[in-house]
Amino acid sequence: MAKKNIDWSGIGFGYQKTDKRFVSDFKNGKWDEGRLIEDDKVVISECAGVLQYAQTVFEGLKAYTTVDGHIVTFRPDLNAARLEESAKRLEIPPYPQDKFIEAVVKTVAANEDYVPPYGTGATLYVRPYIFGSSPVIGVKPADEYQFRVFTTPVGPYFKGGAKPITIRVSDYDRAAPHGTGHIKAGLNYAMSLYQIVDAHNQGFDENMYLDPATRTRVEETGGANFLFITKDNTVVTPKSSSILPSITRRSLMYVAEHYLGLKVEHRPVEFAELKDFAECGLCGTAAVISPVGKIYDHGNEICFPSGMDEMGPVTKKLYETLTGIQMGRIEAPEGWIKVIK
């Protein structure tokens, strides 16, 4: 089979239809075996639970071509587990974790011509999701659901290098103290759209959300966890019950400790501490790490001494090591890489 005729280095981070997608239906109290289909259109009732009450959860991961030519995904078992926890929180019947991994493998394999070649900086983005598909007019969970997986090739997140971004402290809260901030639900992202559009209009790249109870501690952005480096090279990530448990963040912390020999701390981070950190980054599936150069706090600026012009040295080592593991240049911990072909 031949790769699609795509300008791999020229594509952006957006949706492009591929040949196949996986669909499984939940009816009469159980999930069916699922199937690969070609039709990319979803047909549901105008009163479907997802449309009326936002009953949907999702995941995001990538498929890569490694240096030795294999097609792989990165830690899909953690995506499967997180989707299950997200589903339970929204009263959605969880999709079995083993079936989740099978569905991801089948969908990527069916679209292997869209997996970008090694060295292009591009990858195949994989989006599994579940939504309430049956009609619901009273406020209650739907009776029927669909689990779907689609893929789309995406270009390198950073074109021309990872330049440090500028973010601002948001006046809004991302999540309630005992709400849904710890799960990957569509509703969490919907509420962040107003703030991110406003941030862009004001010349900022992202928002920093503080803890909703006291607004004294760092939480995350609308779509990524924070990662800080102290002046003595300790890697620090914020801990909170309303932060999404990022798979990239957990992987970077392991890499920091076990590959780079750095001290790591996963703990509450006071906003007042930020001025004392040497480096800052946002970590997530899309970019792995986006370096942050400056944080704007209502007229006051916090500038990180290492990382104003380019990715800081420790952040860069973390980025290069994790991407090296994903691309097969560096040996991975056991169980991290799922080989598809």
Image: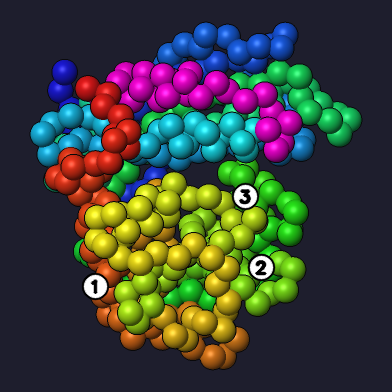
Tell whether label 3 touches label 2 (CB within 8 Å): no
Residue bearing mark 2: 211
| Amino acid type indicated by mark 3 | His
| Amino acid type indicated by mark 2 | Asp
Which quadrant would the N terminus be assigned to in this image?
top left
Which quadrant would the C terminus be assigned to in this image?
top left
Tell whether label 1 touches label 2 (CB within 8 Å): no
Drawn side of residue 320 relative to residue 78, left or right: left
Check disc 1 and report its element: helix, strand or loop.
Answer: helix
Q: Which residue occupies the extreme right position in the image? A: 138
Q: Earlier in the sequence, mark 2 or mark 3?
A: 3
Q: Which mark is residue 182?
A: 3
**Residue 256 within the segment the image draws in magenta:** no
Q: Determine the CA span between mark 2 and mark 3.
A: 13 Å
What's the magenta bit mostly, secondary-structure-wise? helix
> In the rendering, at what x and y percent does residue 121 appear?
21, 48
Magenta segment boundaries in residue numbering: 88-112
The residue lying at 84 percent from left, 30 percent from top is 140
The residue lying at 73 percent from left, 51 percent from top is 179
Q: Nearer the viewer, residue 115 or 243?
A: 243
Badge 1: residue crowd in 10 Å (few <14, some 14–19, many ≥20): some
The residue lying at 55 percent from left, 21 percent from top is 96
Tell me, yes or no, if residue 306 can be seen here: yes
Q: Determine the CA span between mark 2 and mark 1.
A: 29 Å
Question: How many marks on residues?
Answer: 3
Residue bearing mark 1: 313
